[in-house]
Amino acid sequence: MSTSKVATMHDAVADLVRDGDTVAVEGFTHLICFAAGHEIIRQRRRDLTLCRMTPDVIYDQMIGAGVARKLVFSWLGNPGVGSLHAIRRRVENADPEPLEVEEYSHFGMVCRYVAGASNLPFFPIRSYYESDIPKVNPKIVPMRSPYGDGTEVYVVPPLRPDVTIVHAQRADAGGNAQIWGLLGCQKEAAFAADRVIVVCEEIVDEAVVRADPNRTVIPGIVVDAVVEEPLACHPSFVQGYYDRDNAFYLRWDEIARDAGTLDAWLKEWVYDLSSHAEYVEKMGAAYWDALKPEPAMSGQVNYGRYA
Amino acid sequence: MSTSKVATMHDAVADLVRDGDTVAVEGFTHLICFAAGHEIIRQRRRDLTLCRMTPDVIYDQMIGAGVARKLVFSWLGNPGVGSLHAIRRRVENADPEPLEVEEYSHFGMVCRYVAGASNLPFFPIRSYYESDIPKVNPKIVPMRSPYGDGTEVYVVPPLRPDVTIVHAQRADAGGNAQIWGLLGCQKEAAFAADRVIVVCEEIVDEAVVRADPNRTVIPGIVVDAVVEEPLACHPSFVQGYYDRDNAFYLRWDEIARDAGTLDAWLKEWVYDLSSHAEYVEKMGAAYWDALKPEPAMSGQVNYGRYA
Amino acid sequence: MSAEAAADLGYSQAELMIAASARQLAGERNCFVGIGLPNIVCNLAQRTVAPDLQLVYESGVFGARPERLPLSIGDPTLVSGSTAVTSMFELFAFYLQAGLIDVAFLGAAQIDRFGNINTTVIGDYAKPKVRLPGSGGACEIAINARKVFVIMRQGQRSFVDTIHFRTSPGHSGDSEHDRNRGWWGSGPTSVVTDLGTYFFDEEAGEMTLATLHPGVTLDQVRENMGWEPRVAADLGETPSPSEEELRLIREELDPGGVYTR
Amino acid sequence: MSAEAAADLGYSQAELMIAASARQLAGERNCFVGIGLPNIVCNLAQRTVAPDLQLVYESGVFGARPERLPLSIGDPTLVSGSTAVTSMFELFAFYLQAGLIDVAFLGAAQIDRFGNINTTVIGDYAKPKVRLPGSGGACEIAINARKVFVIMRQGQRSFVDTIHFRTSPGHSGDSEHDRNRGWWGSGPTSVVTDLGTYFFDEEAGEMTLATLHPGVTLDQVRENMGWEPRVAADLGETPSPSEEELRLIREELDPGGVYTR
């Protein structure tokens, strides 16, 4: 913890994300680290297996940019809007090339991360009964209770990404990350991974973290790099920091319908910029101000000093 | 949530704890609700199956008072002090009567609650290999991974108490309980149970809970009664409210060595009192003042108002 | 029923569907809320027939009190002021799988007479004509929620004789089998469309037309589904939304008319 | 070695055991701390040979910075000012079972030459002479921690040829078997007693005397164990605690002398 893990997004991605890796950028509607996705696009990683419960706009951008050969997921869409057109082109028409898919249900994906995080060879769930999902995914297999009660469950295999990237409201230089609001499956995905990048709105003093240890979701022990990158989740949101940019989600539907438009967007907003800071600047301060919520404070609790 | 579940300890125990029940009073060193144990003794419940990871002094008192016929546990002792003499008398010498025991390891007990809370027929763990524990507990059985990787795990069965009793720093009248500091397995034990009693230091306005929803550990949805009972965990501790009374843990070692001394203690501190409030009064204000820590505040976080 | 016809009645199709669904939530407690119409349905029920209704979102929120109309299942307005926020593992394991969810809403791209639901693909799985979102939580919701409500527009492409992929299981058509499956769920319990409302016959497990919306004929229903429907012996008319229901929808729940116009 | 003899050397038995154990933590990172001596050992190591050592407690605390000597594994002083507090499920699953714990301390009522540990019963399980605490987390700690250190006093009743119950598995005596068990742990790696320090021979998996404490003879060691011990070819003497180590123990870690006098 005494060692700082602070890095730039460029260096974190350059050092820790490799061609051919299995990568999970997690965050369920909340805390989706678009800036990390953009950096992976910018550094032109290839042949990634991308994992995410909800492939959202960020994976449409990454897959549209050609970084991935395979997608592991449980719900594929632009939430509240509709389809992810770049991904659909690849799945439906192999345009410009095929995309392998491996799909689960939400709880199946979550349990795969839990199994990965817990070093378990499988995880049992009560789902998939009489569904066609196991028919198209042979990794989902039935298992009978050993207690003779006749109960059948399905089991899913562990998911152990090479790299998991998550975003937090704040972290200290050692990578201890605190998150509030929707927690998704970030903790499980981080513990399951070989390498972890924590991106955060603010790097704070260790004393801030230690004042409220129950708020720590990911401990520095599993973290390889900490990147301070404000507004990194746009157009997704960060509870207490900025709102979801719904207009962008709607706009993406238009952008992604056409490969040429998508390429132009990538050129303007990813390739032609050297960092997320430039993206933030290009959008303009007024844009960000409009996404900022009024404060709603949590109140404090007393841990007590026991000296 | 609109319905109040507030009850007195007397009424909560009278209504929800029945002879022959499987009862879990959970809390790992922290938040052990002694006052609930005393009320169960006072109401002379019988034939209980008592479950707890660490049977601690509270179960020595309850078992010494004759409420239980069976104990399910993972570590049996007076932490930092030594033995639980009343329980040992029953296990070693059937004095005054036998006590059935069913034992696991800590993680085995935790996973039993997780399975109970999750409606799973079993839960896999990587423990018990080459240990004698499965030899004396046939409910712990080996299972091979269905993925042909040769990995063997052990599985434990779900634990579903009839009643779980937990203590929280605060709860609202609907039973939504917030806990900080050591979390033990209370959440899992509460979700696993048919009936749940939440005891708390303070009943707070619902708005306090709603200001920091990530702090809620047990939702009112699974809670049947909420009891406001300050200092209910003595001699255990409540983070931020009072310290562990180590002197009492040491004293218990003397008290419990002799059945007569133990009975005299129960008469003076349980049977002859009508409530925990009388226990608090009998100890005297100075006693409690000495256990109170200096404040150490958590700081606040901003959830943001999204209107 | 055309949109104009509905407008003539003083309310929109969506408003009628919302009111009809909300009334079915009378007395319910813990409800897994979807986004869009189901969200408005639940909020309306909470203000009318189900004051104890707790809104649970698969994103991990329990007891939400949104100050604005949430635009996604993970809108930050669902978190602020809620009772509890939990990890998705705990939400699916301790709430849903444990049987604490009384009612859940599911959408469908295709549904068959037994309430089997497809949200995965149109066409062949390996080479789909249309790649749909997939299960999300729907598969385990169908299996673990005690009741499942479906709200959707009906037509020849969505109410089909044979779904292309069974994402979420419904009734099997064999009530004996269904009773012994050992899950909390037993297939959808209610379907509300733009034309009428349906329940599922307990023995046959088959979708059965309960009411026709005002101005809709049985022939219109038949024209908009891929099988010959069972019809309740006491087929009635769906009650119109009350003044109070319309006021709540228009003034409080969807003042912008995003989902209801 | 009698307590008086140790006093003559300018330090207590406990202080020697603490210093000897702490030095073995050089360079380690994540340590599962027990209460009592192991707690002092870890705190001493953090201040000397292992500045990056993180103190992890099975009660769910990571990165503790206790302001006082904790009297139980769940002392509130472990929580205040720590880096993270987590549920016990997560601590055992995500930290321990996942292989993140580099070193753990275990106690023993009985230990055999292979490091198998009994903390369950003396005598017959069904009718025990002495009912001991049982496993607690010990069984999974022995299996999942990468190294296991034992600190205990030795004698004929604790260092036994045949333990009465195997609570926590040690080495098997078959190194080929041990390598293929597929766990992180491989039985204890170090034992420090009041008489000497031991390691486990890699091939035989057997406890081997590495050093004798100052003033202790090999015969004394033999008299205090239930089997004929293996002795390292280069059997040496345990280095005495340094001035700085003694200062830290006496002034900072156990000023009341609760565990060290």
Image (cartoon, coloured by chain):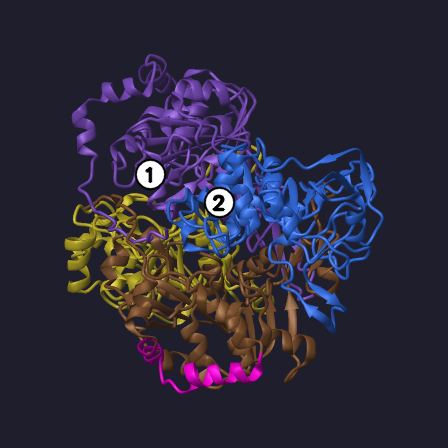
Chain colours: A purple, B brown, C yellow, D blue
Query: Disc 2 marks which amino acid?
Result: Arg
Q: Give the overall secondary structure of the magenta segment.
A: helix
- Along the line of sight, which residue is nearer the eye, C63 or D255? D255
- The reply to whether the magenta stretch includes residue B272 is yes
Between the C-alphas of marks 1 and 2, the distance is 28 Å
Magenta stretch in the rendered image: B258-282
- Along the line of sight, which residue is nearer the eye, D53 or A286? D53
Residue B181 at what x, y percent from top left?
40, 54
> Can you tell which of label 1 and label 2 is closer to the viewer?
2
Counting the numbered discs, the total is: 2
Res. A207 mark: 1
Residue found at x 33% / y 24%: A255
Q: Label 2 belongs to which residue?
A: D250
In the image, residue A41 above or below residue C110: above
- The reply to whether the magenta stretch includes residue B34 is no
Res. D187 mark: none
